[in-house]
Image (cartoon, rainbow, N blue to C red):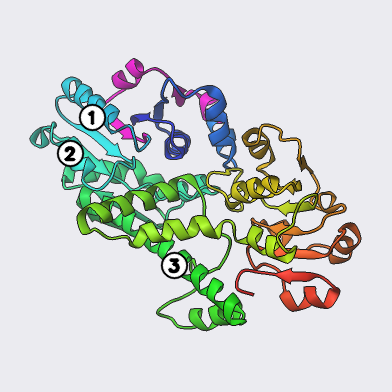
Amino acid sequence: MHITIWGNELIAWTAAAALAESGNHVTLVAHAEQDRKEIEFKTSNEPELEQLIQKEQQSGRLKISTEENGIAHGPNHILALNPDQYDNAKILVNRLSDIYTSNLLIINQSNFGVGSSDQLQNGLNLDDNQVIAYIPDMLSEGSALQGYKYPETIIVGSSNDWATLNIRALLRPFTQAMKQWLIMTPTEAEFTKFANTGMLALRLGYINELANLADQLNVDIEVIREGMISDPRIGPHYLNPGCGFGGLHFQQYIEGLSMLMAEVRNSKLLDTVLLENEKQKEHPFRKLWRYYACDLKGKTISIWGLSFKPGTASIDNAPSLKVICSLLAQGCKVQVHDPEAMDNIKEHFNHEANITFFDNCYAALQDSDGLLLLTEWPEYWSPEYADMLNLMHHPLIIDGRNIFDKDMLKSLGFNYYGVGR
């Protein structure tokens, strides 16, 4: 098939690479204001994605081209635009409908809000199979390519049999081991995406609230969590307390649903989750500040983990940003390590003089007055504790992800504080 993909979101690059690899001829139209540096930044955050893009460009199946070439490429299109580009999408859809007067398939994967696909459909003729369908962007940053190629479920928002048939054919290479297709209306599919994201945010917010309460009641949240997940009605998913969630797309969807709930229902439920999550990002700093009796000036503080989650170099809405800003404001020297996100932090803080970057996580502990663990990268889970004790000036660990064994660390001579522990 000949497919044109519009946009510079992660889903655009992932779909382009995966669809080209499966034999399609793909034209990708990224927006003019997005320069090559930003494109490389987005794809380099994803394991294997950048290499696959280069491979498919060399094969000739994937071309990054102009708007004119994208329109002329054929009647199959995927919209993967930024949330604020709905007007661009509307103009594009109208242009395509003038050229492809029948059998025009446009798959919307943009976060424009509930009901937006139906609004785009209003200018098209369903009787001639000019169709807007919606497929939620279910990718997780850090594992986007694997998530696209090996989905467990695909939700398709389509009320047109011709469009559904063509979507099944297009995605057939990725559905051989898939558990289920879910076919619903475009609006229902848009609502489902918002609902899923909101539920995950609520679970994360709830377990963090319980962890903060556990701190005050002097109980260990890990014991409470084990009791909770033993109930089959609850389960373990997204019930790990920590120093707040981040990520660009996750945050965007929660904010979008929060706005919708406020407008239609006058509900503040997700507003509260978002507000409390921002406070939670400062949780490790507040524990450090209290430990040193509100005087951190001149302290050397180490940070392990800068990305918003393991498996990605992205620092979008990461807790590390707030924590580093707070430490610098208190006059600290900050020593940091992350397996992937160092370049992004360097660029974000514009080579701030009081931040030192280390390629080795142990070197980042030299003469440290405390370690803040902010991202649960696998290499941090079982460190050499004796080396840590020898390197640190003061053996303080504040574990923002509860990955360490509290009792063992205390027995070794560390002062240990977790989230709700």
On the image, the x and y values in percent for residue 152 come to 41, 58
63 w.r.t. 156: above or below: above
Q: Which residues are magenta?
A: 55-81
- In the rendered view of the protein, which quadrant contains the C terminus? bottom right
Q: Is residue 240 magenta?
A: no
Choose the circle earlier in sequence order: 2 or 1: 1
For disc 1, the neighbor class at 10 Å (few under 14, some 14 to 19, many from 20) is some
Q: Amino acid at mark 1?
A: Lys
43 w.r.t. 270: above or below: above
Q: Which residue is mark 2?
A: 119
Q: How many marks?
A: 3
Q: Which residue is mark 1?
A: 90
Choose the circle earlier in sequence order: 2 or 3: 2
Choose the circle earlier in sequence order: 3 or 1: 1
Q: Residue at x 23, y 29 (%)?
A: 90
The one of 290 and 416 positioned closer to us in this rendering: 290
On the image, the x and y values in percent for residue 282 come to 59, 57
On the image, the x and y values in percent for residue 6 come to 36, 29
Q: Which residue is mark 3?
A: 203
